[in-house]
Amino acid sequence: MYTYKNFFVIPLLLIGQFALSQAPNLGETPSQEMLSSWDTTIDPLGRGLPDGSGTAEEGQPVFLMKCAACHGVEGEGLINDRLVGGHGTIGSDRAVKTVGSYWPYATTLYDYIRRAMPYINPHSLSDQEVYQLTAYILYMNEIIEADERLDKNNLANIEMPNRLNFFSYEYELP
């Protein structure tokens, strides 16, 4: 026979069972070494950039091999993956946001490539390849010369065409 007493006893038994059950074994606390390998923050001033270097001349073959399938041979891409062009369109109704027309910092380009590209295999590029690709994309946007070597000492000094249309990065990080 069903009583209201059973209505309260069953949930109490279930709660007790959950309280006495083992905690799930979800892993281990990461070591300091593991944490430092994940700390890949690069700020607009270039702090956090790794060793390595590259030129556009070195970056072209890497781009053709690892990037052209999505971004096109000359960076023309499709509507949302275009890397070049768009100059003078930012204030218009049909803004074309590319590296050369929109991005404020060259270090952000490096950081984005390093973290997210290629789309089907992120984090697969070496730091050297990322410098080479950054140089090549900046070259395609007529921001640097083909033989200009980029590294952690000069990447933050690249003046992007749209840098003045963003808030300046003048504060100090903790």
Image: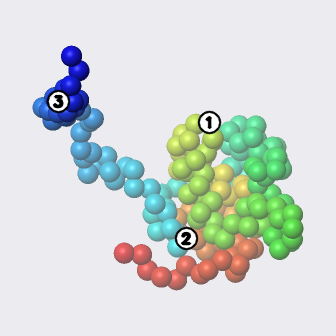
What numbered label is drawn on residue 44?
A: 2
Residue 44 appears at what percent x and percent y? 55, 70
Q: Nearer the viewer, mark 1 or mark 3?
A: 3
Residue 14 appears at what percent x and percent y? 20, 29
User: Mark 1 packing: few (<14 Cα in 10 Å), some, or many (20+)?
Assistant: few
Residue at 70% x, 81% y is 164
Q: CA distance from mark 2 to mark 3?
A: 66 Å
Label 1 sits on what residue type? Answer: Ile
What residue would you read off at disc 1?
120
Q: Quadrant of residue 13?
A: top left
Q: Nearer the viewer, mark 2 or mark 3?
A: 3
Screen quadrant of the N terminus: top left
- N-terminal of the pair, mark 1 or mark 3, is 3
Label 2 sits on what residue type? Answer: Pro
User: Mark 2 packing: few (<14 Cα in 10 Å), some, or many (20+)?
Assistant: many
Residue 102 appears at what percent x and percent y? 73, 67
Please say whether residue 155 is visible from this viewpoint. Answer: yes
- N-terminal of the pair, mark 2 or mark 3, is 3
> Which residue is nearer to you in this view: 114 or 51?
114
Q: Quadrant of residue 55?
A: bottom right
What residue would you read off at disc 3?
5
